[in-house]
Image (cartoon, helix red, strand yellow):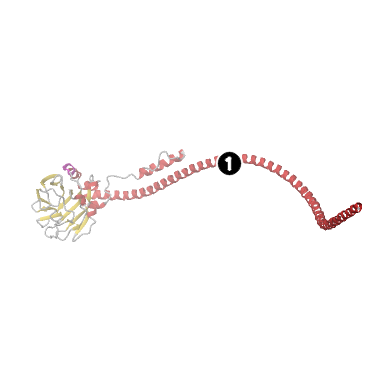
Amino acid sequence: SSGINAEWPLRPGTRKIMFLLLSLVTLSIAPSRGAAGSLDRLKLLKFADNGHSYIQFSPDWSALTDVVSACGWIKDLGSSSNERTMWSRDNNWKMTVMADAKYVGILGNRMMLQSKFSVPKGTWYHMCSTWSRRSRTHRHYINGKELGSRQTPDRSLSTSLPLILGKWGTSTSYPFGGEMSYLNFYSKELSPSEIVSMVEQGMCVNIVEEDEHESFRVIKWEDLVKLERSGTVTDVYIAECADLLELSAKLEESERKLKDTADELTETRQELNSTVAKLEETQADNEEKDQNLEDISSRLNSTLVELEKSQADNADKEQNLEDISSRLNSTHTELEKSQADNEEKDQNLEEVSNRLNSTLAELKKSQADNAEKEQNLEDISSRLNSTVAELEEASSSLNRTWDWNIFL
């Protein structure tokens, strides 16, 4: 996937160029098929015939406890041992070639399966051992032919035991003393037809071609050849596969160069995707900015309308203000005139007040004089009344005297 939406909003010319570039990148990094991918798959392991040459490690058996197939290519070099153990997990599972050409397998608690076969020493042959808890059957195959089977108990294999290549457990009496290559352990019970297909490919092609059961390959040969070894265990490329080895080396070099190119193209694609993402983000930002600009423009137009209205209102207000100012000036003039009049009135009022005060003083003095005059008048009246009384008494006395004189 180019990581580009067909609806991305770029200019048509730009969008077309970006699609062409990313299509080229996608095609250039498409994975190749058919190459081994690692020259280690074309190596064999040769175990010395001394009981001290082996490889031991503890793989993760969790995917192989209820179903397993072990398949590989074996070359018997004619060891001096009567039992030549290719691999073992103690008595939980071991595969042994007997001196009398018996192919012996022990799977779980000494459930032994022996198969008779005849393969010349020094010759590569394909061997396979399959088992599943579901079928409860252990089968042997040599060069694609089933040589025997045996029913097994309904129980899982142990997950705690190590895998040992080249001998049986801790014993030194059963060394393999031969060569093996492309030994793999699958989490699948391979069918007879699948095993025949491996054999029909031939050893070199079977090793070099992509494994049809790759997703089930749990323990892989290219990992086994890299493990730490004990004793004399050597690894060399398989001489019978020299042509394919050279071709694989060239393919691996081509794959390395292609991978470098693919890495560069991937980086370029990532940069293009990043650029596209930035362009989309920029365009989204621009759209948002355009929308914001449109909103601002709308608000600006609305503001202009309001401003024009405000200006008209301000003109009215200025006219009103001018009228008010004119009236205010007129009022101020009148006020100044009024103030002048008031000052004059204040002056007149002060003079009136002064005259009033003077009049009040004179009035008070006049009242005092009047009071004194009234007192004098009252005294005069009193004296006058007294005089009148005296005159009346004198007149009365005179009248009596007169009357008496007349009587006389």
Q: For mark 1, give the secondary structure.
A: helix
Q: Which image quadrant for residue 54? A: bottom left
Q: Quadrant of the N terminus?
A: top left
Which one is nearer the viewer's eye here, 385 or 155? 385
Q: How many marks?
A: 1
In this rendering, the answer to whether 366 lies above or below 202 is below
Residue at horizontal 55 percent and vertical 41 percent from the top: 299
Where's residue 383, x and y in %? 85, 58
Three-letter amino acid code at the position of disc 1: Thr
Q: Which image quadrant for residue 144? A: top left
Where's residue 349, x and y in %? 79, 52
Dominant secondary-structure state across the stretch colored magenta: helix
Residue at horizontal 21 percent and vertical 50 percent from the top: 63
Where's residue 148, x and y in %? 10, 46
Q: Which residues are magenta?
A: 191-195
Queried whether the magenta region covers residue 193, the answer comes back as yes
Residue at horizontal 12 percent and vertical 44 percent from the top: 146
The residue lying furthest to the left in this view is 100
The residue lying furthest to the front in this view is 408
In this rendering, the answer to whether 54 lies above or below 127 is below
Q: Disc 1 designates what residue?
A: 303
Where's residue 83, x and y in %? 10, 55
Residue count near mark 1 (Cα–Cα under 10 Å), binned few <14, some 14–19, many ≥20: some
Queried whether the magenta region covers residue 129, the answer comes back as no
Q: Is residue 48 left or right of residue 351?
A: left
